[in-house]
């Protein structure tokens, strides 16, 4: 028998009786079987965090039930301490270093290095025209990598990002000081995006190393704000680990008033996601309201790539739907996600998959199993294409709900593809 969280079953029963619900009525409200709820109440079955949040919402328990289900083990020590470690590895791994790429690398990756081999430092007082051309090409290439990241497996995009970041660092020393600073700034954005692709590939340690590298490069360029955005990125890792406390703490440190509004808005969203994990509805909604205001007021910076997603027309509205799933309010979540998913651009496949799976999860948790299966079936080819570890986290959660009805025709129609999509690579 699995160990039951202390007091959960008895507290669930007390809250259910106080709400005037029978076992059958509560089971119907959260779309679990009566037998499953009974086993949880008697202590013979361990509750999942998802069930605890659904019961919190159904019984208006304000997070008291979620608080009784142990969260993921917190990281050792202060989560802020680990942000200072530089990346490790040799020239072919995720480490730093400024050596020019080999001929093989240049031929494989394409060519920021080839463009810059003949660049010489600009003389004092002279315009840095060659460097400007190099910067424009490098910036345009970054946009193409982001487009590729929407359509290809993260593991296929990561090597090119890594090489471009290293090449830009080398080239920064061969141009004038103004262009050198801007090349370092762009190299930082390559490194930051490499961190995201590493996380999408399922390698959290590499994701953290690349994020730290991005902070170092940004500091070299005089951009000290990226260190705060790195906390937001790290908080996403702890969120997917189910660690609400670290998610909230990391995001809160990135909300200092002197920071740009976009970073503070993204941090507010992440903090709201952390509060949703523990069923704190009021704190979550306050964070989302703050995020909405900050992101709406954020100035557009045409000189550097946008931090965070650029494919959501209303990020706060989409994240509201995302959080409502974690808060155990799937029907409300489905309404938000239906509306916002329809606004995602057609070529943003990774974004479609990410929020589309969460949308299907909301409909499944709301008891709309056939519709959830239909949505899932439409998404599987896309999820296979983009190869994302984080999307797979929600897809596994979705599969567990759908598999409660293994004989329904809608589930049988998608089951083979769903099983194949969730199978470990190489099996």
Image (spheres, helix red, strand yellow):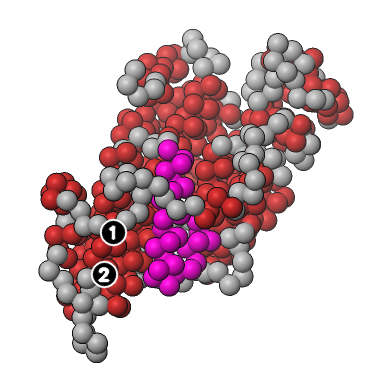
How would you rate the neighbour count of disc 1 (Cα within 10 Å): few for under 14, some for 14-19, many for 20 or more?
Answer: some
Q: Give coordinates of residue 55: x percent, y percent.
A: 72, 30
Q: Secondary structure at mark 1?
A: loop
User: Residue 211: within the magenta?
Assistant: yes
> Splitting the image into 4 quarters, where does residue 132 fall?
bottom left
Label annotation for residue 98: 1
Q: Secondary structure at mark 2?
A: loop
Is residue 55 something that shows in the picture? yes
Q: Nearer the viewer, residue 91 or 6?
A: 91
- Give the spatial CA distance, label 2 vs label 1: 9 Å
> Splitting the image into 4 quarters, where does residue 140 fall?
bottom left
- Whichever of labels 2 and 1 marks the residue nearer the N terminus, that label is 1
Read off the residue under disc 2: 173
Please indicate whether residue 31 sits to the left or right of residue 342 in the image. right
Please indicate whether residue 33 sits to the left or right of residue 109 in the image. right
Q: Residue at x 46, y 40 (%)?
A: 204
Label annotation for residue 155: none
Locate the C terminus and report the quarter of the image it occupies: top left
Q: Nearer the viewer, residue 103 or 30?
A: 103
Answer yes or no: do the residues labelled 2 and 1 have beta carbons within 8 Å?
yes
Locate the N terminus and report the quarter of the image it occupies: top right
Q: Which residues are magenta?
A: 203-230
């Amino acid at each position: 028998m699995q160990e039951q969280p202390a007091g959960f079953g008895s507290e669930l029963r007390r809250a259910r009786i106080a709400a005037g619900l029978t076992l059958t009525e509560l089971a119907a409200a959260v779309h679990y079987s009566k037998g499953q709820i009974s086993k949880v109440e008697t202590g013979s079955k361990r509750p999942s965090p998802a069930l605890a949040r659904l019961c919190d919402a159904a019984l208006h328990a304000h997070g008291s039930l979620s608080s009784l289900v142990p969260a993921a083990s917190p990281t050792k020590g202060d989560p802020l301490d680990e942000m200072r470690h530089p990346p490790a590895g040799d020239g072919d791994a995720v480490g730093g270093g400024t050596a020019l790429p080999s001929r093989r690398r240049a031929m494989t990756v394409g060519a920021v290095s080839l463009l810059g081999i003949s660049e010489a430092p600009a003389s004092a007082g002279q315009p840095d025209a060659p460097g400007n051309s190099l910067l424009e090409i490098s910036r345009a290439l970054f946009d193409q990598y982001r487009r590729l990241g929407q359509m290809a497996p993260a593991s296929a995009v990561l090597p090119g990002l890594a090489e471009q970041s290293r090449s830009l660092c080398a080239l920064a020393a061969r141009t004038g000081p103004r262009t050198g600073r801007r090349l370092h700034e762009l190299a930082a954005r390559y490194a930051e995006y490499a961190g995201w692709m590493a996380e999408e590939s399922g390698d959290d340690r590499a994701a953290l190393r690349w994020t730290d590298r991005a902070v170092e490069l940004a500091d070299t360029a005089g951009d000290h704000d990226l260190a705060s955005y790195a906390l937001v990125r790290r908080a996403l890792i702890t969120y997917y680990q189910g660690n609400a406390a670290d998610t909230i703490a990391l995001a809160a440190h990135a909300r200092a008033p002197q920071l740009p509004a976009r970073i503070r808005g993204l941090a507010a969203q992440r903090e709201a996601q952390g509060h949703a994990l523990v069923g704190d509805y009021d704190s979550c909604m306050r964070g989302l309201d703050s995020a909405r205001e900050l992101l709406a007021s954020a100035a557009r910076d045409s000189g550097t790539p946008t931090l965070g997603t650029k494919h959501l027309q209303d990020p706060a509205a989409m994240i509201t739907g995302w959080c409502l799933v974690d808060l155990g309010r799937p029907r409300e979540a489905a309404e938000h996600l239906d509306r916002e998913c329809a606004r995602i651009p057609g070529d943003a496949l990774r974004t479609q998959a990410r929020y589309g799976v969460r949308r299907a999860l909301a409909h499944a948790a709301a008891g709309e199993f056939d519709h959830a299966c239909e949505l899932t079936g439409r998404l599987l080819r896309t999820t296979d294409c983009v190869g994302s570890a984080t999307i797979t986290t929600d897809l596994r959660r979705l599969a567990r709900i759908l598999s409660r009805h293994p004989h329904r025709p809608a589930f049988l129609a998608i089951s083979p593809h769903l099983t194949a999509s969730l199978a470990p690579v190489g099996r």
